[in-house]
Image (cartoon, rainbow, N blue to C red):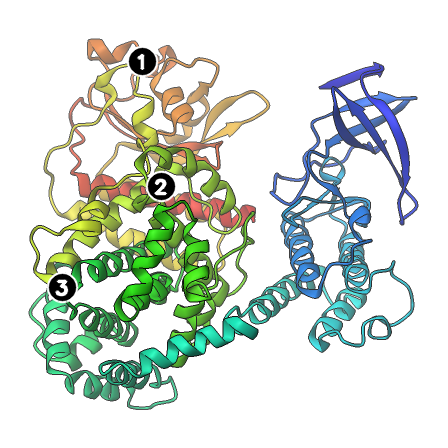
Amino acid sequence: MNRDNDNAEYQPIRHIHCSDGSQLLLASTSGQQYLLMPMPEEASRVAPHHGLLASPSGDTILNSQQYACYPTGDSKMLAETLQAKPDAREAAGMACDIMEALLHLQLQQLALPNLDAEHTLVNPHGQISLLGQHAAIADDSEQQRHNVQQAGQLLYQLLGGRPYSSLALQKLRPDLDTELLQLCQTLLDCPGPAIAITRTSLAQLQDWLVRQQRFIRTEGNQQAALEQLLQRMRHSPDFPALSQAISAINHIGNADSERLQVLAEIILKDFSLTNKLLKVVNAANFSQFGGSVSTVSRAIVILGFDTIRNLALTLLLFEHMHNRSHAQEVRDVATKALFCGLLARSLARRSRMQEAEEALICGMFQQLGELLCVYYFRNEYRLIHKKISAGSSAAQAVQHTLGLSYATLGASTADMWSFPERIVSSLEPYPLGPVRQPQHSAARLRMLGNLANELTHLLTGPSGIRAGQVQPLLVRYERACALEANTLHEVITETQAEFANYLQEWSGEATPQGNAQHLKTAALGPHPDSQHPAPAAELEASYVHTTPATTSLLSSGIQDITTTLLGNYQLNDLLRMILEIMYRAVGFDHVLLCTRDPRQNTLHARFGFGEDTAALLPQFKIDLQQQDNAFCIAMERNVDIFIEDASAPAISSHIPRWYRQLDLAQTFIIFPLVLEKRKIGFLYGDKKQAHSLPLRPDELNLLKTLRNQALLAIRQKQN
């Protein structure tokens, strides 16, 4: 939408005088409103895309002034919304968005030219978007510091209900939390490097929000309903013993010098729990260490305290819940909870988060309220489902029947059982709208539990609506846990395999019923890679057996990369490590990293390993405009392609002419690097002779893991 002359497509509505002395122009065209922001006379940098930075749709010239055009959509200027003063939690949430956007810019060594209530948009969900992406200021530490102070002025305005002035915020809001007052003053003073203040303030804001939004602190009728339900459970003959056992395990803290011994003693007190735990430990999911485990103490030493503690808690709860006459109803909810926990753990592992074991508990306990209801309040549970059948939403039916939500019941019980605050707070559901990026461990656990819960609800819901809800879910969580659709399908498939093993190990049921059977096979919809098959079926890979040395070398290399990702590293150094691992482990003749040149829309080989690589690099160039070749197909559709014989009649038409002229290799493999639909490049490996690169499925998966680690490294450096 570039405009090169004065034209009437944009109809000015009014000039907006901003608090920093600049001006914006509100204009409309084709029934849509835009905020027009002046373009700088000198060249400036365009900030990288981020969900909290508004993107201009183009530019125009009006009255000899060039403007960047920002569509407002259903958003309003923050200045227009401040008349209805937000409460402290809403203000802190908006401040979180502002600080997250600033941190993104600071990591790119950029700053915004303007940051005030007029250059800030807010949508109906309360999410912030900052104007100025087109005019980012590079390498200006003073402007970055000024942005932090401007963010403090905005927070002052949000909390105080009036523009920033020398009047102390405490005078305007004597009721305000001291922590928020101090945080606002820190931003206003910015007593240190801008990026350090931004990072620390963002973490403090999110931590404050989590603590303020503890939803189990109920009042009035809801508190009375909660007390009544808890009292009914306490009077159940079996509940006190269960509570005592779970609380005893949760009270083992890091300060206990003999905590392994204490945990072993608690488990050994329950003969049934001991046998069940050892059975699970010796089953396939935990057998990677080899040999048979015959004692709880050895299980703790081998698998670790956290793993055995979480396994014991899970077994205690689920073994207890199966002992009822209405077992199938209980089993359906229990298996849904188990699947949700395994899914949360898989998501944590895929995202390289350290909280994987705790994520299992946080995921399972998303269903704790429903599990307690079906077990202890059978009549109410059936009434809830009658109301749902009559047309009520699930949330309404639960609230009207119990007087509170499943989440509140589950979190209150977990709190009573002495689960850590980070686990209890993880059970709080997210409101509608985008999910913020978690800045600390407790926030990550809440994000993992909620995402796993929403996915589990999708999988247990009507199959006809699942496919249409996947993309909105990915968009909702894109800032918190960036996942692509094909990765999500892979995570679910992995979880289903684990789930099937657990069902066999825990219950011994070869043919599970109800929810268990459904969750073993449910899918969100067609796998993205299956929706656009390659032009020739022969582009699909076929695999044969190779020696186990490849697997061992790849696994060791992946561990090395994982360790490197946790420390400080240079991106190019890490990418070279990945190429070297591929080169040594598989025995490629050449391995290359190719990256995209957006100006020419081409892919260029940057570095690699193999014979005469230096001479090969300048010749290895792909034109992305030529769509019908293996390299462009891999990039366009984000699919891995394995060519076993480039000279085969069905394949040769998909091999570009320049590649054939190089006479490089007859067998090669391409792993595209695509991050949030951005085509970054690909990893390439080849062998001279046709059919000379046999790969087993497990080896291919390890190579894919290396590619995913490359993407993770790129994402971390970009953030």
Q: Position of residue 546 (x, y in %)?
A: 11, 39
Is 38 on the left-hand or right-hand side of 317? Answer: right
Asked whether 456 or 482 is in front, the reply is: 456
Q: Position of residue 318 (x, y in %)?
A: 22, 68
Residue at 44 percent across and 13 percent down: it is: 626
Badge 3 amino acid = Trp
Q: Is residue 242 above or below residue 422?
A: below
Asked whether 654 or 348 is in front, the reply is: 348
**Which badge, 1 or 2, is on the more N-terminal residue?**
2
Residue at 11 percent across and 62 percent down: it is: 507
Callout 2 environment at 10 Å: few (<14), some (14 to 19), or many (20+)? Answer: some
Is 564 on the left-hand or right-hand side of 223? Answer: left
**Which badge, 3 or 1, is on the more N-terminal residue?**
3
**Which badge, 2 or 3, is on the more N-terminal residue?**
2
Quarter of image, res 153: bottom right
Is 507 on the left-hand or right-hand side of 523? Answer: left
Q: Position of residue 639 (x, y in %)?
A: 34, 29
Q: Dot 3: what SS?
A: helix
Q: Which mark is residue 654?
A: 1
Q: Is residue 526 visible?
A: yes
Badge 1 amino acid = His
Q: On the image, numbered disc 2 is attached to which residue?
A: 487
Callout 3 environment at 10 Å: few (<14), some (14 to 19), or many (20+)? Answer: some
Residue at 30 percent across and 19 percent down: it is: 534
Q: Dot 1: what SS?
A: loop
Q: On the image, numbered disc 3 is attached to which residue?
A: 506
Callout 1 environment at 10 Å: few (<14), some (14 to 19), or many (20+)? Answer: many
